[in-house]
Amino acid sequence: MPDKAWKRSEREIAKRVDGERNPVGTGKADVTSELFAIEVKERKSLPMWLVHALQQSKSASRGKLNLVVLHELGKRHDNDYVLMQMSVFQSLMEKINET
């Protein structure tokens, strides 16, 4: 029986972060590594406003690592979400590991 697409995505993310995919029902995140507990969400498509925000961030980055901060009006900024492309995340991790 072929793998489900979401399982393949979880395995790919685990490989990229030098982690492991955890089976459903273990009470663990989809993927864990030494530093991270990752939930992997796969959808047929992402909201266009989100895609556009990432594109805007990338086009304005001028060689810097680009990211998007998602803030809910009236909420504390401590609860904001930080979003970046996997390639940006991997570049960030490479820079951290260089130090």
Image: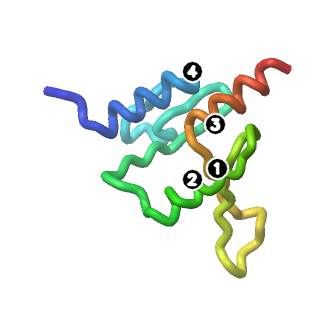
Q: Give the CA distance from mark 1 to mark 4.
A: 29 Å
Kind of element beneath mark 3:
helix
80 is higher (above) or lower (below) than 39: below
**Cα gap from disc 1 to disc 3, whole angstroms:** 13 Å
Assess whether mark 2 and mark 3 are in contact (beta carbons under 8 angstroms). no
Q: Amino acid at mark 1?
A: Ser
Which mark sits nearer the N-terminus, 1 or 4? 4
Q: Amino acid at mark 3?
A: Val
Identify which amino acid the numbered label 4 is placed on: Asp
Which image quadrant is residue 32 in? top right
Tell me which residue sits at (71%, 75%) in the image: 75
Q: Name the residue rendered at 43%, 37% in the picture.
A: 26
Q: Which residue is mark 4?
A: 18
The reply to whether the C-beta atoms of the residues labelled 3 and 4 are less than 8 Å apart is no
Q: How many marks?
A: 4
**Mark 1 and mark 3 residues within 8 Å of each other at the beta carbon:** no
Q: Label 2, on which residue?
A: 55
Mark 2 or mark 4: which is in front?
A: 2
Front label number (1 vs 4): 1
Q: Which quadrant, please, contains the C terminus?
A: top right
Work out how far the residue at label 3 is from the one at label 2, CA to CA, in angstroms: 13 Å
- In the rendered image, which residue does mark 1 sit on? 59
Crowding near the residue tagged with mark 2, few <14, some 14–19, many ≥20 C-alpha atoms within 10 Å: some
**Looking at the image, which residue is at 65% across and 53% down?**
57
The residue pinned by badge 3 equals 88
What residue is drawn where x is 68% and y is 59%? 69
- Distance in Å between CA atoms under marks 2 and 4: 27 Å
Viewer-closest of 21 and 95: 95
